[in-house]
Amino acid sequence: MNTGDRESGDAGGEGLPDDNSRTTSHADQMLISYLDGEMDERTSAELESRLASDQTLRMRLHEFQQTWDMLDEVQPPQKGDSFVRTTIEVVVSEARNRARQRKRMLQRTMAGLAFFILPLVAGFYWMRSVQHRPEREFIADLTFWENMELYDQVDSIRLMEEIHNAGWFSGEMSNER
């Protein structure tokens, strides 16, 4: 086949595409329909008339016919029980792989969340436990405030220390007298 004939057929913008073209032209579609027997008689007669006068189109039809002939000679693969079994095994294997991947992704996500959330929760509770709270000081000093009237009547700090050591106001009495 002379590729120069082919390229010259496309020079006017009509006809067949050159070898670099990836799209199927209208002429190619017509030729394929002709070979498949999908054309009505009128369109088929018009194409045959065009084939009689267009060398490039005849060559393209010949190429398609050779391709059709080669395809007819190719034996389809035998699909027996082993083909079905192998296909099912591949599908099952792929499904298992995808399930494993999803499980690993879920585990990684959960580990990432735990790695992020657990320190936050632990930090929150730690801050709550060490946080300075005014009510804690008040509760610790409650005994003092409850006995403030008595302390006002004492002139010496030494007497207050003895009372404290004796445990008179804390509910425990010491035997140090």
Image (cartoon, rainbow, N blue to C red):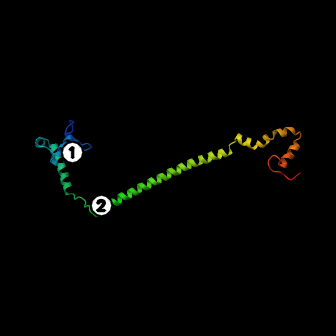
Mark 1, other Cα within 10 Å: few <14 / some 14–19 / many ≥20:
few
Q: Secondary structure at mark 2?
A: helix
In the image, residue 155 above or below residue 95: above
- Residue 4 in the image: state x and y as whole percent: 20, 43
Q: How many marks?
A: 2
Instruction: Name the residue: 32% across, 62% down.
Output: 85
Foreground of the two, 168 or 13 = 168
What x and y, as percent, mark residue 64? 19, 49
Mark 2 — residue? 84
Residue 148 in the image: x percent, y percent? Answer: 81, 39
Residue 163 appears in the rendering = yes
Q: Kindly identify which numbered label has been placed on residue 131.
A: none
**Image quadrant assignment for residue 75:** bottom left
Can you tell which quarter of the image residue 52 is in? top left
Horizontal side of residue 90 vs 105, given as left or right: left
Name the residue nearer the viewer: 147 or 8. 147
Q: What is the three-letter code of the residue carrying label 2? A: Val
Task: Name the residue located 56 percent from the left edge and 50 percent from the top edge.
Answer: 115
Badge 1 is on which residue?
A: 3
**Is 155 positioned to the left or the right of 128 in the image?**
right
- Dot 1 or dot 2: first in sequence order is 1
Label 1 residue SS: helix
Mark 1, mark 2: which one is toward the viewer? 2
On the rendered structure, is 81 left or right of 152?
A: left
Identify the residue at image location x=37%, y=58%.
Answer: 92
Kindly indicate the quadrant of the structure image that contains residue 48: top left
